[in-house]
Image (cartoon, grey):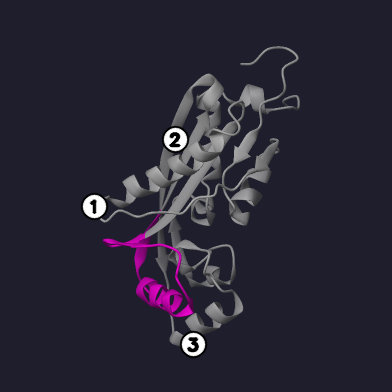
């Protein structure tokens, strides 16, 4: 993929999430961060997976037009409790409401990942789902978490990698997916689609 002497293809992560940035860093693959100027829209007639996939694809598509020779990765994570999609809380009261709803319950965390490489007309993606069960939570515990580690930028009003990790009783599936990017699935997707040879700049072990 690519020609000798051509600039190495790199990953462009179309996300402002510091959690996703930290996860991609673990792959030791060159990447840059270009957060799209994008306002998420939710359509009431869409099912959660359709919404999640659409948002990831739209984020990737916006940035890909600026970087057609690089692999642009967009992602979107949602929390689904029963039939309700829990997005990012609007304020502290909304965060408390979400955490009270999650208390003692099992919910789904879904992350859609979209990959776009315009110069090679590559469009692909996937959705990873993880089941997460919370311990029953006391109001004081919720208040303390919201005060000490405000979760206003996190779907479902919690981040498993921060203080709210103590709320989690069980994780069934990919832990990194709950953080914001299913790292192993992402790496395998790159391999399966022949994208790694142009991304890796070091010799294999």
The quarter of the displayed image where residue 101 is located: bottom left
Q: Is 157 rendered above or below residue 48? A: below
Disc 2 or 3, which lies upstream in sequence?
Answer: 2
Magenta segment range?
Answer: 80-109
Q: Position of residue 88 (x, y in %)?
A: 45, 64
Q: Which residue is mark 3?
A: 140
Q: Which mark is residue 125?
A: 2
Nearer the camera: disc 3 or disc 1: 1
Q: Is residue 4 visible?
A: yes
- Helix, strand or loop at label 1? It is loop
Q: CA distance from mark 1 to mark 2?
A: 22 Å
Q: How far is disc 3 from disc 1 in space, using C-alphas?
A: 36 Å
The label nearer to you, 2 versus 3, is: 2
Residue 60: x and y, percent? 51, 39
Q: Which residue is mark 1?
A: 45
- State the quadrant of the C terminus: top right
> Residue shown at 57%/44% (left/top)?
14
Q: Are marks 3 and 1 in contact (CB under 8 Å)?
A: no
Magenta highlight on residue 204: no
Residue reaching furthest to the bottom: 140
The percent coordinates of residue 11 (x first, y second) are 63, 35
């Amino acid at each position: 993929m690519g020609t000798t002497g051509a600039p190495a293809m790199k990953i462009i992560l179309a996300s402002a999430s510091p959690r996703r940035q930290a996860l991609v860093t673990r792959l030791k693959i060159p990447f840059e961060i270009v957060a799209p100027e994008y306002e998420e829209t939710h359509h009431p007639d869409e099912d959660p997976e359709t919404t999640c996939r659409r948002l990831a694809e739209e984020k990737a598509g916006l940035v890909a037009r600026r970087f057609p020779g690089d692999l642009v990765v967009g992602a979107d994570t949602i929390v689904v409790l029963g039939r309700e999609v829990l997005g990012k809380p609007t304020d502290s009261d909304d965060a408390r409401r979400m955490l009270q709803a999650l208390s003692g319950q099992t919910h789904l965390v879904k992350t859609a990942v979209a990959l776009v490489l315009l110069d090679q007309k590559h469009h692909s993606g996937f959705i990873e789902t993880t089941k997460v069960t919370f311990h029953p939570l006391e109001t004081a515990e919720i208040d303390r978490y919201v005060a000490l580690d405000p979760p206003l930028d996190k779907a479902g009003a919690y981040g498993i990698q921060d203080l709210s990790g103590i709320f989690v009783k069980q994780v069934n599936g990919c832990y990194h997916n709950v953080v914001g990017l299913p790292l192993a699935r992402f790496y395998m997707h790159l391999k399966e689609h022949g994208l790694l040879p142009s991304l890796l700049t070091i010799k294999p072990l």
